[in-house]
Image (cartoon, rainbow, N blue to C red):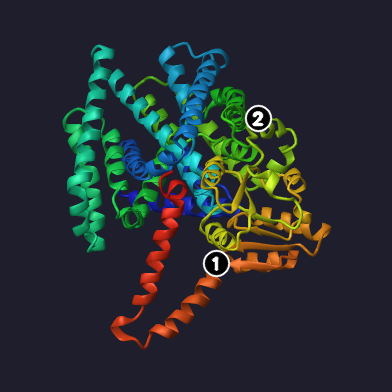
């Protein structure tokens, strides 16, 4: 133990170096941590870290990972798209698990039903760390596919918690079915207790904690680990307990502050868990036998998952682009799967071979999936024509009021948000109508029900056929409100300017670099939201700074009235959905 600091320091330094290298390659740092653990195992005699300590690393890492996973459960996203999420999410879980079971039984030759069932489950879960990180980086959290993916993560988390409950019930030593049933009762009890605490106690306690960063950090850990400890005392899984505790904190108004304080500790837990996981991997002469099953598993997860989600999207009448994006974003094996695989190995349900195949396949899927994420739009364009059958299946009524809107000198609006609603009010005041194109079926139904100045069309603006069908080159003005869809706006702008330079094209962005790029492509005007906000606030500030205590009161009142009016006008879509 005298070399513990030296050994840990060497591993952390190596992990940092590899993580930086993978960052440049736009790969997940998870691979770096596992690699460090593998190297540590190869030089076990020189590292001098007891195996018991690596087991402690594993347990601490699992606890911290599950706590943060609980906090990231987004029930609001689930509620927004619950019909599509339940169909596509449950379909993905059931079919992926079934395919994994068949693969484990028929291809890998797993002979115990319990082993190939859990093997199938491990192939089902997608990485929350990678998926949410990508959605945030692409600014896709509020898109249709982003909302469905966030809901899928909720369903997968629930499924994983149930799987861990069943696993714990199977390892109690008594009759299996009564043990599992009793554990489910404890799970329901833990959820009820956590809900009551969140509703009546935690919001008051954490309001006090939030007054001090140090107390907020300690209080959060105290509640989470204390809840897990109580679960351990009543012979219930502390892993599930800490997940439930995280979910109960995640609904508090202090969630963002808590996440900012606890996130570094969660990252430390990630490092510990994956280093310890890599240390468990044993490579020897038998490792050559893992190559074929790992390659097949990686190929199945990376390439079959998008096909599965496209098929489910076709059935549920999604457009081709969101269906493709969903499958191409969630096509990797999750850290949750590695937690489940680790618990299965500890419980004797997984053999070393099954554990190795799952872990190595996870690394392979992360590498390939992360590479594919860099080229999502290019990949979609490549497969757009073969996916036209999905477009035909998803097509609803072309648009309402077609006979009233001539496809010449018309106004086309791309995307529906607060900016669109403001423009719609101006058009209504002038008794003018405009064509609104959006990929979200909820937007189509909402705008159609309003019977206002907007004529809705359910279509994908990435599809050149849409530009032709709605005569973009004959319009008087095309306005895009698709903040975050820079490539789509650039493509539409070039299409319009090549065919009819007199058509005004207006785009929206929150980036000065993107604004310059759009102007370079020929945009008539760019709504740069941050620049407009800064300019408007400068004017307001100059007017109000001399008013003393009465400063900003009039602007505040007007802003609140505008927000309430917008909320009332758009409540069905922006707030209730």
Question: Is disc 2 placed on a helix, strand or loop?
Answer: helix
Counting other residues with Cα less than 10 Å from the Cα at mark 2, is it few (<14), some (14-19), or many (20 or more)?
some
Identify the residue at image location x=39%, y=25%.
345
Q: CA distance from mark 1 to mark 2?
A: 36 Å
Q: Position of residue 169 (x, y in %)?
A: 28, 20
Q: Position of residue 302 (x, y in %)?
A: 60, 33
Left or right for 248, reference 350: left
Left or right for 267, reference 21: left
The foreground one among 355 and 135 is 135
Identify the residue at image location x=51%, y=54%.
17
On the image, which quarter does residue 463 sit in? Answer: top right
Can you see residue 73? no
Counting other residues with Cα less than 10 Å from the Cα at mark 1, is it few (<14), some (14-19), or many (20 or more)?
some
Question: Is disc 1 placed on a helix, strand or loop?
Answer: helix
Q: Which residue is mark 2?
A: 393
Q: Position of residue 161 (x, y in %)?
A: 35, 30
Q: Quadrant of the C terminus?
A: top left
Badge 1 vs badge 2, beta-carbon distance below 8 Å: no
Q: Which mark is residue 529?
A: 1
């Amino acid at each position: 133990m005298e070399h513990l600091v030296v050994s840990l320091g060497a591993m952390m330094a190596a992990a940092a170096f590899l993580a930086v290298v993978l960052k440049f390659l736009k790969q997940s740092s998870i691979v770096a941590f596992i690699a460090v653990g593998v190297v540590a195992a190869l030089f076990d005699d020189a590292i001098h870290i007891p195996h018991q300590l690596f087991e402690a690393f594993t347990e601490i890492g699992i606890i911290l990972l599950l706590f943060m996973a609980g906090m990231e459960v987004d029930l609001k996203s689930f509620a927004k798209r619950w019909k599509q999420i339940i169909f596509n999410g449950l379909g993905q879980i059931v079919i992926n698990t079934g395919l994994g079971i068949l693969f484990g039984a028929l291809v890998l030759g797993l002979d115990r039903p319990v082993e190939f069932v859990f093997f199938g489950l491990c192939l089902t879960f997608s990485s929350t760390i990678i998926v949410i990180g990508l959605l945030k980086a692409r600014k896709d959290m509020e898109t249709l596919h982003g909302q469905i993916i966030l809901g899928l993560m909720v369903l997968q988390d629930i499924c994983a918690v149930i799987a861990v409950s069943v696993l714990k019930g199977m390892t109690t030593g008594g009759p299996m079915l009564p043990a599992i049933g009793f554990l489910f009762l404890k799970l329901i009890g833990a959820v009820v207790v956590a809900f009551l605490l969140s509703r009546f106690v935690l919001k008051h306690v954490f309001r006090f904690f939030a007054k001090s960063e140090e107390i907020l950090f300690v209080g959060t850990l105290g509640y989470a680990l204390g809840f897990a400890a109580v679960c351990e005392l009543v012979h219930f899984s502390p892993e599930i307990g800490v997940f439930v505790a995280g979910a109960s904190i995640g609904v508090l108004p202090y969630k963002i502050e808590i996440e900012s304080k606890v996130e570094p500790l969660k990252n430390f837990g990630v490092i510990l868990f994956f280093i310890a996981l890599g240390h468990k991997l044993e490579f020897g002469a038998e490792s050559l036998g893992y190559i074929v099953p790992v390659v097949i598993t990686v190929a199945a997860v990376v390439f079959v998952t998008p096909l599965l989600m496209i098929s489910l999207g076709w059935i549920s009448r999604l457009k081709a682009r969101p269906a493709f994006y969903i499958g191409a974003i969630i096509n990797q094996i999750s850290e949750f799967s590695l937690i489940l695989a680790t618990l299965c190995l500890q419980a004797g349900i997984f053999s070393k071979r099954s554990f190795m195949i799952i872990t190595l396949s996870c690394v392979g899927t992360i590498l390939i999936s992360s590479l594919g994420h860099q080229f999502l739009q290019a990949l979609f364009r490549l497969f757009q024509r073969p996916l036209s059958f999905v477009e035909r299946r998803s097509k609803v009524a072309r648009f309402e009021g077609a006979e009233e809107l001539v496809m010449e000198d018309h106004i086309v609006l791309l995307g529906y948000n607060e900016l669109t609603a403001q423009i719609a009010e101006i058009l209504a005041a002038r008794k003018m109508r405009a064509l609104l194109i959006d990929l979200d079926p909820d937007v189509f139904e909402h705008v159609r029900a309003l019977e206002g100045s907007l004529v809705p069309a359910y279509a994908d603006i990435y599809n050149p056929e849409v530009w032709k069908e709605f005569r973009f080159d004959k319009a008087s003005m095309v306005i895009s409100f698709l903040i975050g869809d820079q490539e789509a706006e650039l493509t539409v702008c070039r299409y319009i300017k090549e065919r009819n330079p007199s058509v005004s094209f207006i785009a929206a962005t929150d980036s000065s670099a993107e604004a310059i790029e759009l102007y370079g492509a020929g945009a008539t005007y760019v709504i740069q939201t941050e620049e407009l906000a800064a300019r408007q606030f400068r004017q307001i500030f100059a007017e109000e700074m001399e008013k003393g205590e009465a400063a900003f009161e009039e602007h505040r009142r007007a802003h609140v009235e505008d927000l309430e009016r917008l909320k009332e006008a758009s409540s069905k879509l922006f707030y209730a959905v």
